[in-house]
Image: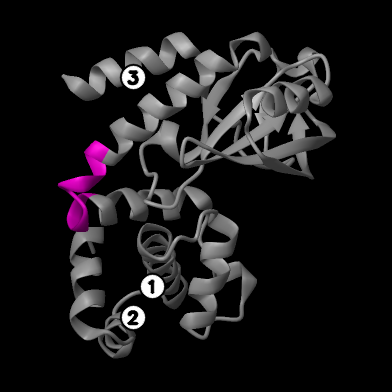
Amino acid sequence: MQLKVFFRLQRMTHCSGIMAQMSRHRPRSTSLRAEIAATAARLMAEDGVDDFATAKRKAARQLGVNEPHMLPGNDEIEEALHAYLALYQSDEHPERTRTLRLEALDIMQTLAPFHPYLTGAVLKGFAGPFSAIELQLFPDSSKEVEIFLLDYGVQFTSRELRRYTGDQARAVSVIEAEWNGSPVCLHIFDPRDERTAIKSSLAGKVMERATIAEVKALIGSDHD
């Protein structure tokens, strides 16, 4: 079933009754994965859930699914999210994407000494109204970035997150801030990792990212 039809049925029923009947006509695992992906996409688009792992767990709980092997992959949720945005936010989403990319470009230009790269939902075009602008930075030290932000008048909090560069696990500093009213998430990597493939998990896909020049080109294509 096409995702757009799937979403319309979810909106029309407001329950899982019809979806349960439909699942009799195809393998249970396929039906559940699709339903979880569609529900997770709606949570990300409408409810401010900003990461795939949280969205799929919440979606599974809502649907009463307890089997971890039934959970869809991030790529399945991303596909469902693009379909949801095209169906229900076709007017506002393109403008939101362009606005966020322009804001990201402005921040990247300010942070140019730290070799910024845009990544995440804003780059990939499925950012919701609550999505943060995610950047990867490669300074000599995270303290440099913190001092820069303080001098620039940006308040922030910091934490650590695990990322993989090649096959090596790294404890990465993450700085979260609000920049001109927009949430921003800065991932601070070692400068030696700039030319290395970065992943969120050992078995995960390489994270897509874009330089300042590439973001400018992307914004230009948005305008065409």
- CB under 8 Å between discs 2 and 3: no
Image x and y of residue 34, in percent: 39, 66
Q: Callout 3: few (<14), some (14-19), or many (20+) C-alpha neighbours within 10 Å?
A: some
User: In the picture, which quadrant includes the C terminus?
Assistant: top left
Tell which tag, 3 or 1, sits nearer the viewer: 3
- Where is mark 1, residue-wise? 31
Q: Does dot 1 land on a helix, a strand or a loop?
A: helix
- What's the mark number on residue 218? 3
Viewer-proximal residue, 209 or 158? 158
Using the numbered discs, state the Cα–Cα distance from disc 1 to disc 2 in whole angstroms: 5 Å
Of the pair 204 and 47, the residue shown nearer to us: 47
Span of residues in magenta: 86-95
Q: Amino acid at mark 3?
A: Leu
Q: Dot 3: what SS?
A: helix
Q: Any magenta on residue 153?
A: no
Quadrant position of residue 9 = bottom left
In the image, what residue occupies the spot 77% across and 24% down?
A: 147
Which x, y percent locates residue 102?
Answer: 36, 25
Q: In this picture, is 170 found above or below 29? A: above
